Amino acid sequence: MASFNAFANERQPVIAVVVDGKENVAELKFTSNELRLFYWRKQLFWPMGRRIKPVNLTAEHSLRLQFSQIVLGSTPKKQIDYWNGLYFDGISPPYSVNSEEAVLRYVSQTDGAIGYLNACKIDHRVKPLAWIINNQISMSEPATNNCDK
């Protein structure tokens, strides 16, 4: 498995958007706009018909803040009214977990799951499909570097 430089710049780590390591990634290709739709719960199914189950880190987690601002265009705190408005329609926000290890477990053990974590935490349980580097969403794998630098 390739390892990635932990920081695209001094402050922000490279974030990997991941799915289960056993998935056929060719069936799960998506655009940056579709990624937004997954997390806003506006696109609910993968092309092969399985329900998309996005997972978030807790609202206070630094990767969640970075992911939310870049992918969703707002902070978790500003999203509260959006989710409260959908509550009566039976639409819940993505499931939240407390750690990147919990993201790895959820994604690898939940059919249709998608999540994100520091790219340096990727292991055999997941496959990366997109990256967030320098405040940009990229569908191309970044150059490999040693995460321990």
Image: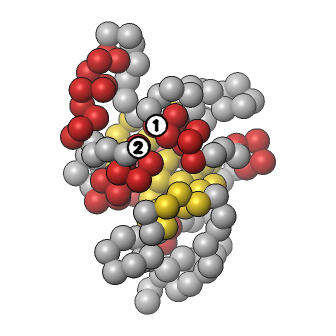
Report the residue marked by disc 1.
39
- Kindly check if marks 1 and 2 are in contact, taking CB atoms under 8 A apart as contact: yes
Using a 10 Å C-alpha cutoff, classify the residue at mark 2 as few (fewer than 14 neighbours), some (14 to 19) or many (20 or more): some
The percent coordinates of residue 103 (x first, y second) are 44, 50
Q: Give the answer, above or below, for where 73 lies relative to 83.
A: below
Q: Is residue 125 visible?
A: no
Quadrant where the C terminus sits is bottom left
Using a 10 Å C-alpha cutoff, classify the residue at mark 1 as few (fewer than 14 neighbours), some (14 to 19) or many (20 or more): many
Q: Residue at x 65, y 73 (%)?
A: 1
| First in residue order: circle 1 vs circle 2 | 1
C-alpha span from label 1 to label 2? 8 Å
Q: Residue at x 36, y 70 (%)?
A: 12
Tell me: 124 left or right of 146.
right
- Looking at the rendered structure, the kind of residue marked 2 is Leu
Front in this rendered view, residue 124 or 67:
67
The way the protein has been coloured in the rendering is secondary structure
When asked about the image quadrant of residue 128, the answer is bottom right
Q: Give the answer, above or below, for where 114 lies relative to 38.
A: below
The percent coordinates of residue 102 (x first, y second) are 40, 51
Q: Residue at x 53, y 57 (%)?
A: 137
Secondary structure beneath label 1: helix
Tell me: 57 left or right of 47.
left
Q: Give the answer, above or below, for where 85 lies relative to 74.
A: above
Report the residue marked by disc 2.
72
Q: Give the answer, above or below, for where 54 lies relative to 64.
A: above
Q: Is residue 149 visible?
A: yes
The percent coordinates of residue 75 (x first, y second) are 28, 46
- Looking at the rendered structure, the kind of residue marked 1 is Tyr
The percent coordinates of residue 77 (x first, y second) are 21, 40
